[in-house]
Amino acid sequence: MKEFSYERPESLDEALQVLATSGSDIEILAGGTDLVIAMRDRYSQPKVVVDIKRIAELSPSLVWDDNAVTLSATATMSEVVGDEGINTHFPALVEAAVVVGSVQIRNRATVLGNICNGSPAADTAPPLLAYDAVIVVAGPDGIRRIPIDDFIVGPGRTDLHEGEIAIAVEVAVPPRMVGSAYERMTRRRGTDLASVTLCATVDDAGVTQVAYGSVGPRAWLKVDETGVLADPSASVEAKAAVFEEIFADASPSVRSLRASPDYRRAMLRVLGARAVERAIERLQELQGVS
Amino acid sequence: MSESVHIEVTINGRDRAFEVAANHTLLDVLRDQLGLTGTKECCVVGECGACTVVVDGIPMNSCLMLAVEIDGRDVTSVEGLAKDGHLNALQQAFLDVSAPQCGFCIPGQLMSAHALLQRNPNPTVDDVHEALGGNLCRCAGYLQITEAVLVAAKAGQQ
């Protein structure tokens, strides 16, 4: 690992000050599960590493407030998996977080880091897209709140500008009743990157949101307002036609070692059908108890 | 600009204060600076778990963290399990059921199992598989390793 100077700000102001004076050769360190590897392999050679884990404003890492949960930049996958409210309202986010790496990785890896790292295969991206999460960014001009669909740009790229720091992701409990599910395909069970990731949400007005990743430069969010996907009695053929449109943006790389483009496209349809089916079941359970 | 940072930590129950290079991982510092070579270096990308240590009660890969990050924390490595020259129940169980084969992964397995038993003294087989899922054993001694954790849990109940 190349040499760098280590900064550990204790307040957001101090952190922004460091960012303002350090130029562009800077890396933000939260969980470090991607960054430390990148620095050791010298993909990343920052002059300054800013450890944000002791910034007072980022604690506590997980706060519920008025039907919305705020995960600060220090909230780990394990914390998300262990939170009762998230299990109740955002089960697909738990399903995505619990399959990231191993226990040791999940104890360190942060949800926001997963998004900022910009991997097309980021497990938490599809559920956060499907739940309409908002990324909170602090910068010299104050706070920006960016819908996650606009924040995610491409492989390794986000809408984060120089001098800014992503401080939180907010997820609001939707006003309507929503069932949701996350599906993922890997080559083997256990520590592996996903070949296809997909999350579906179905609400009680018949609107289905499908977000999918690992089949192109970024994870995509698509909405079906026809009611076909949400309809348990709709035919497989009718649903397949809707899925065809939804998956039109899939452009899996031919260079990936994990799965061929044809296989990924085929599995996208399988996971799509599974996730929508489970989301409908969960919605029905909610409707049953209400 | 090689930055040296002063840190104060508790390692295996002992308070220590020393300087670390900012660009050294916790694994580097444990092995090369403190001579605690029980913690193993293997994949260095967080897939094998051989470098697992317990920080403030939570198992982590020491290859994926900077040593400066443990400033103010409590770290237990495999050397911290035995007390007064005696193996603890978990280590003894690993021996009794012959869980170690080549032995290289065992420090990491022990630390993941130790963290599990601290949190959940009565784990199921599934709990053990989940907690140790990030620790690979290329001798494939998984059955014995799982058994050892369950035997240790039982011993702890008595």
Image (cartoon, coloured by chain):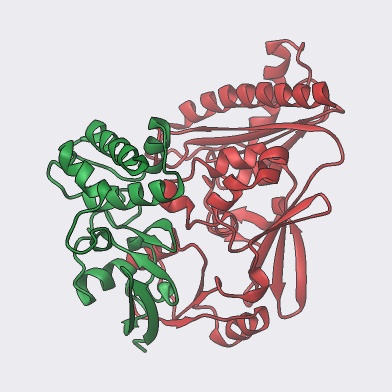
Q: Which picture quadrant has residue B149?
A: top left
Residue B101 in the image, given as x and y percentages of width and height: 13, 41
Q: Nearer the viewer, residue A218 or B120?
A: B120
Q: How many marks?
A: 0
Residue at 40% x, 69% y: name it: B74
In this rendering, position of residue B38 left or right of residue A126: left
Q: Nearer the viewer, residue A76 or A219?
A: A76
Residue at 55% x, 57% y: name it: A110
Residue A2 in the image, given as x and y percentages of width and height: 33, 76
In this rendering, position of residue A81 left or right of residue B101: right
* Quarter in which the C terminus of chain A is drawn: top right
Chain B appears what colour?
green
Chain A appears what colour?
red
Say whether residue B128 is visible: yes
Residue B107 in the image, given as x and y percentages of width and height: 24, 53
Q: Which picture quadrant has residue B97?
A: top left
Q: Nearer the viewer, residue A223 or A182?
A: A182
In this rendering, position of residue A263 left or right of residue B15: right
The vertical placement of B77 against A192, above or below, is below
Say whether residue A42 is visible: no
The vertical placement of B33 against A263, above or below, is below
Q: Which picture quadrant has residue B102?
A: top left
The vertical placement of B3 against B53, above or below, is below
Residue A201 in the image, given as x and y percentages of width and height: 72, 33
Q: Nearer the viewer, residue A64 or A154?
A: A64
Residue at 38% x, 71% y: name it: B66
In the orientation shown, which residue stands out farthest toward the front?
B158
Residue at 23% x, 77% y: name it: B33
In the orientation shown, which residue stands out farthest toward the left?
B102
The vertical placement of B126 against A273, above or below, is below
* Quarter in which the N terminus of chain A is drawn: bottom left
